Image: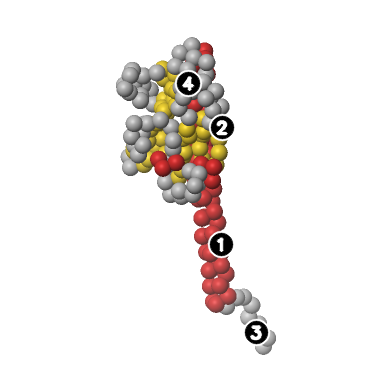
Amino acid sequence: MNSSTAGYTLVELLVVVMMMGALAVLGTAGFLGWLERLRVNAAQSAALNAIHEAKSRSTQQKGTWQTTFREVEINGKSYVQWAVHPDPPAGEVAPMGIHWQTIEYPGVKVDTANTTLYTKQKSTGPWRVQFNYKGHTNGQLGKITLTSQNNSKVKRCVIVSTLLGYIRVASDKPCQPKK
């Protein structure tokens, strides 16, 4: 009688399952990092568009307009909000009753240590950038830096870098303070 056995041993199957598990963990970590970068990039794009909108409205309507940013918590998740509006009354950063837009990416927050836009309370905001009727800043340059709540190494910022209102974006190291 000729009996042959074919197949894999239990040890071989366990090794393959462990290797697949390790690869799945590595792939998941890479995917989650990519997803965080994608969210922060989208938030940066929304912030850039909001600042451009305030600059555009200031020249179209021949008045002082600003973009204001704040951070709020909704259902235990951190969100960044922005609003474009005319210059508020003296002594206020943002007028009462303005319509706030939410950047719909939970876990994206304002990096308060690296945000240099004007604010009365650096650690809590709100932060603002103003443009006069020519589209120039009102002497207040700075940047809004956004980061991931889970990975503070991912940084994206929008920088208003000249008095003429030149706006640019940067990522990671340029968003850090110069030492």
* The one of 49 and 121 positioned closer to us in this rendering: 121
Q: Which mark is residue 23?
A: 1
User: Reading the chain from its start, which is encountered first: label 1 or label 4?
Assistant: 1
Helix, strand or loop at mark 4: strand
Q: Is residue 163 above or below residue 158?
A: above
Residue drawn at (46%, 22%), measured in percent from left and top? 138
Amino acid type at image mark 4: Phe
Give the number of the mark in front: 3 or 2.
Answer: 2
Amino acid type at image mark 1: Leu
User: Reading the chain from its start, which is encountered first: label 2 or label 4?
Assistant: 4
Q: Which mark is residue 3?
A: 3
Q: Answer with left or right where residue 82 lies relative to residue 91.
A: right
Q: CA distance from mark 3 to mark 2?
A: 75 Å
Q: Residues within 10 Å of mark 4 (few under 14, many from 20)?
A: many
Percent position of residue 161, x then y: 53, 31
- The answer to whether any part of residue 39 appears in the image is no
Residue drawn at (31%, 22%), measured in percent from left and top? 91
Amino acid type at image mark 3: Ser
Q: Which mark is residue 168?
A: 2
Residue bearing the label numbered 4 = 131
Percent position of residue 110, x then y: 42, 39
Helix, strand or loop at mark 2: strand
Residue drawn at (32%, 23%), measured in percent from left and top? 92
Please identify the quarter of the rendering in which residue 73 is found: top left
Amino acid type at image mark 2: Arg
Q: CA distance from mark 3 to mark 4?
A: 87 Å
Q: CA distance from mark 1 to mark 4?
A: 51 Å
Percent position of residue 16, x then y: 57, 69
Q: CA distance from mark 2 to mark 1?
A: 39 Å
Give the number of the mark in front: 1 or 4.
Answer: 4
User: Reading the chain from its start, which is encountered first: label 1 or label 3?
Assistant: 3
User: Reading the chain from its start, which is encountered first: label 2 or label 1?
Assistant: 1
